[in-house]
Image: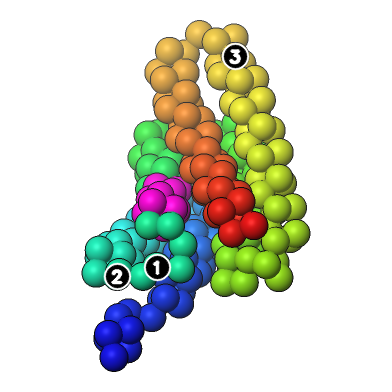
Amino acid sequence: MLRGLLPKEEAFFDYFDQLMVINKTISETFANMIEGKLDQQEASATIKKLERDADRISRVCLNLLHRTFITPLERDDIFNLVKCLDGFADKVNSTAFRLANFGVTELRPESYEFAKIIVNAVQALEVAIHGLKNIKKNEQIIREKCIYIHDLENESDEINRLAVSKLFEQDDVMLLIKWKSIYERMESAVDRLERAANIIETIIIDHA
């Protein structure tokens, strides 16, 4: 009787999937913005709306977590995973805003590399998170996707280091400040995805 009154466990997985659909759209919109396929202001506005949608879903999910006695995963893992997914949306939104409003007239080559990494990492994370619905069946593919995300994060670290070092080769201080801020947020976005992968790997160990 009591169990019938509790929220269904599957709801958490549904919220994870919803957040990943939003983040996938955000990453693709951001990539199109970088590649010049979308107007910067238009793309930034779209990403901002999607980020607010991610905020709303995150709040609903965390409210459910507070009301649920029996959860399919550890409570801390659910909480931290949701915060990572929401944090990714926030970082890309912040990056897009700067690109659209900081007077950046020419995109630097590293921004294209970052955009590609972000899209690939989000796609991998989407598969890994969806696999959590049946960990035993999907363990191998989940592990492979998490490893891939770690590799992409390492690649983004290197891109960031080289990109920032190149900024100091020119004399425009304002340009340096603008791009350093943009690079930091793109790197932070990838970092959020890697943190999510770390949480997923912990979940797999707990369910071994």
- Residue at horizontal 66 percent and vertical 49 percent from the top: 146
Foreground label between 2 and 3: 2
Question: What amino acid is labelled 2 in the image?
Answer: Thr
- Residue at horizontal 33 percent and vertical 84 percent from the top: 3
The secondary element bearing badge 3 is classed as helix
> Considering depth in this image, is 152 or 202 the residue closer to the camera?
202
Q: Residue furthest front?
A: 1
- Distance between the alpha carbons at the discs numbered 3 and 1: 46 Å
Image location (x, y in percent) of residue 120:
67, 52
Residues packed near mark 1 inside 10 Å, few (<14), some (14 to 19) or many (20 plus): some
Magenta stretch secondary structure, dominant: helix
- Distance between the alpha carbons at the discs numbered 2 and 3: 49 Å
The secondary element bearing badge 1 is classed as loop
Question: What amino acid is labelled 1 in the image?
Answer: Thr
Image location (x, y in percent) of residue 84:
43, 49
Q: Is residue 23 left or right of residue 134?
A: left
Look at the picture and state if 11 lies above or below 176.
Answer: below
Q: Which residue is mark 1?
A: 71
Are the residues flagged by discs 2 and 1 in contact, CB closer than 8 Å?
Answer: yes
Residue 117 shows in the view: yes
Residues packed near mark 3 inside 10 Å, few (<14), some (14 to 19) or many (20 plus): few
> Considering depth in this image, is 9 or 147 the residue closer to the camera?
9
Q: Which residue is mark 2?
A: 68
Q: Which residue is mark 3?
A: 165
- Residue at horizontal 61 percent and vertical 20 percent from the top: 161
Residues packed near mark 2 inside 10 Å, few (<14), some (14 to 19) or many (20 plus): some
Q: Is residue 52 left or right of residue 36?
A: left
Image location (x, y in percent) of residue 128:
63, 60
Q: From which residue to which does the magenta span run?
A: 76-88
Question: What amino acid is labelled 3 in the image?
Answer: Ser
